[in-house]
Image: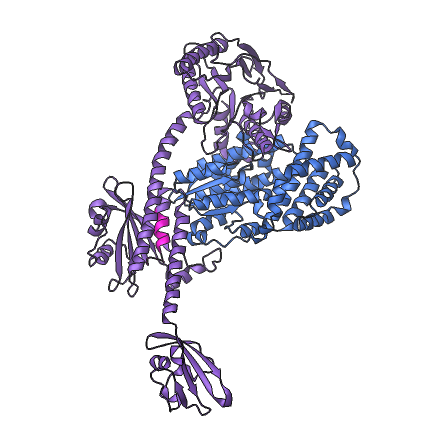
Amino acid sequence: MTATTTEAHPAQAFPGYLECLAEADEHAAVEVARGLLESGVPAERVLLDLVAPAQAEVGERWARDEWSVAQEHAATHISERVVAAVAAYADPRPTRGRIVVACMDGEWHALPARLVAEVLRLRGWQITFLGASVPAAHLVSYLHRYDAHAVALACALPMRLPHAHRMIEACRRSDVPVVVGGRGFGGDGRWARVLGVPWAPDAPTAADLVADERALRAVPPARLDHLADDEYASLAKRRGELIDSALADLRERVPGVRHYTPAQLDSTVSDLGYIVDFLAAALYVDDETLFTEFVEWLVAILVSRRVPAGAVALTLDHYGQRLHDFPRAGRFLDRARALVGGLSAVPER
Amino acid sequence: MVEHFREGLIVCDADGVVRHLSPVAERLVPEVVPGEVLAAAGVAALGGDDPGEFTHHGRRLRLRRVPLSAGRRCWYVEDVTESVSRADALLAERARSAFLAVVGEKLGNPLHPDRAAAAVVRLAVPTVADVAVLVLAPRSGRARWWRAVRADDDAGDNFSSARLTPRRDLEPSPAVDSGVLAAAALPSAIEEGLGGAEPHALDWLVEQAVEAGWLPGLDEAGATARVVPLPGREAPAGVLLVARRAGRWHDEADLDLVRAFAARAGAALTTALLYRDQAEVADTLQASLLPVEPAAAQGVQWGTAYRPAQAGLRIGGDFYGSHRLVDGGSVFFLGDVSGKGVEAAVFTGQLRQCLHALHRVESQPARLLKLLNDALLETTQAHGQGRFATMVLGVVRPHRDGGLTLTMAGGGHLPPLVLLASGEVEVVPLSGMLIGVVPDPRIGEVTVHLAPGETCLLYSDGVTEARGGRRGEEQFGAERLLHAVTGCHRMPAPALAERVEQVTCDWLGHGDHDDIAVLALRATTPGRPGRHLHAVPGPVGTDRTRETDA
């Protein structure tokens, strides 16, 4: 091998790899990864130091509106192919039990979970990767059919936490321990602690956790006493009505909304729905930061797409009025409203 | 009158001399003598200032002191032995019911058989055993066993540093392991249990279990063991051996508890085994009805997505597939049969088999679809099913100027979309009648040329008829689909198919849906020189690129 190969390092290959993703050039991307492997970089490092950060960058570029959804999809597809190629190259022999890796129903960002699956595979586990958006019923019938040492469940969006909790409970009813990961449980896993489920911040930690049978079985109790106030359940029931009235409110107060194209209207409706869903999830785990972090993120996304943040403020106000008999929700909305306060004023269009 | 009291009475004067002793008190505390100092009786509890309950001559006594006038004091003594033992019995009974309730909860759900076996031994420790061994009824001469051993406290401490999650208020869960024994090597008491009897000769049981290597760290001397069969459908599903360390034998109530536990464990194991057998059959049948991924074809990049309505089932009434033709082209199809669930899936199986056979005699799409129509009509009439299908069936061939030529026939299905290199999306004008309804249906046919990088997209009505939106009642519709794929012309076909599935499911929220199927064909771009390969060291990479580009 030449001098350049001995210095092969994922960080050096990173810019070239990202260019392959930008060009949607699958072959070239696979070659970059394979080049690293052939010069002796361990498969796990290629996955965690090349593929994972590149995918994070892809997400950033989408958030900054530099890349379209289509570009993001294409890049993700190529990353998947690279992961498959790395896995095929390493071809580890399974020596340990079966771990089932799945993404929450409704979640399509399967790559982080796929990386965890491959790292576990490299460490000798027999892996079943059920993929993106796995319906709970499918997961449970799989667990009845095949004995699993543990289930690793990924949740990328905190708004799915109530659903994640139901899925965790379903796995436990099959007597299979669950490990969770993903940003949906909070950067520090605090919402996993509320739900009473072991959490791993990254793939190596997940590997350590599933290897520790006692830690898997030691389940701290869920701290969900606050659900007794019924705010979560009532809010979930009023979802459709809240979106309708918020849309009517926007139409009245923001003249531009009346002239929205059907597509613009659809994305407005889905944004209004996200606000309700994140608020509901914040109520579920009783943590206002879940909601305020989301509102900050939403404002950043909308601003990068030239939608004025004032529209978000209007909707927060509107939800606040509609939910006057929801003390916890009211508090969360107030906090979020204070955050976007400086950005208010009725938008132009 | 004092004699009739339930409580005994002792009265002392200011000097502590016993002045009165009721017959009840005399019986309960015979050491106390009238006329003598109370302290001389040597009953410690009577000397204390804050008396309560104490045990005296094997009975539980409750004491209460009341000051009287002129410095005199009086003690009431009550025999509470029976109420205490009744309370103890009640508590023990409650603990047993609580244990059985937990067992019912854990074993009441359908489990994988291995999970059920592991759960049985884990639940048995520590309530009914220090070591629990479950031996399943042998299958083909081999008996599988599971064992749980009560975790020693010091063993738990050794582990605690390695733990990632702190454990609170929990008995350390017992370590579970498992193994296999030849049926011939099973201890005789186990064999007897598998025959359905609860062995009565217990003397050799511990020795037998030790010999089988099942009782690690258990001191043989003084340890006790029992074997109970776990009831199954006909013969026992297995047997449970419960062993206790010295000094903790099983009394009759314990044995009743073990038997009640065994009944629940047996039911759970039987259900698990029954479920597994049926799931095996169902899985095999389902696998034969799942769409088969399209076969690799020159110049075509396939992309598929499939999401049946009933998630637990994995199969449905939508189907797609492809068959290679001898001339280098491929037949491809996507469609939807009437109905849902298993029956619809079975019909798709018949339909796909028909096509598999028919494409060998006819590869012209419209004529092939008519042949299929006749075949299906015959089948459905013979079975009186009244089922029909909608589908698009096409033949794809590489075009001599690059790209692909697609000739498609329409059988009452939604028209395909073409994603042009310009970024525009065109609806392919393709109409036709349902397949399997009338003898000579009108079938439309159209030919489309895909330039390199262009994609043709076929989808089922589960996409456009997905109900979601604000109230979950609005259909997704063709307009939204067109909008969702506009600008996606550079996407690889698998990514495009997944995107259609994703936007549809996002629209649905968590609502119910019909079967969803997507098939995308992309004309691959001719291989380009590896201009990114400067990042790849060595000649190996370049070689491989040439291979893949070829």
Q: Is residue B524 above or below residue B176?
A: above
Residue at the (43%, 21%) spot, across then down: B347
Please indicate whether residue A170 sits to the left or right of residue A14 in the image.
Answer: left
Residue at x 64%, y 50% (from the top left corner): A289
In magenta segment, residue B122: yes
**Image coordinates for residue A9, horizontal then vertical, percent:** 54, 43
Q: Which residues are magenta?
A: B117-129
The part of the image, by quadrant, that contains residue B470 is: top right
Chain shown in purple: B
In the current view of this chain or complex, which residue is farthest to the front?
A: B1
Q: Does the magenta run of residues contain B509? A: no
Residue situated in front as seen by the camera: B36 or B538: B36
Q: Nearer the viewer, residue A153 or A40?
A: A153
Residue B204 visible from this viewpoint: yes
Q: Position of residue B264 (x, y in %)?
A: 35, 48
Q: Residue B228, position in %: x, y? A: 27, 51
The secondary structure that dominates the magenta segment is helix
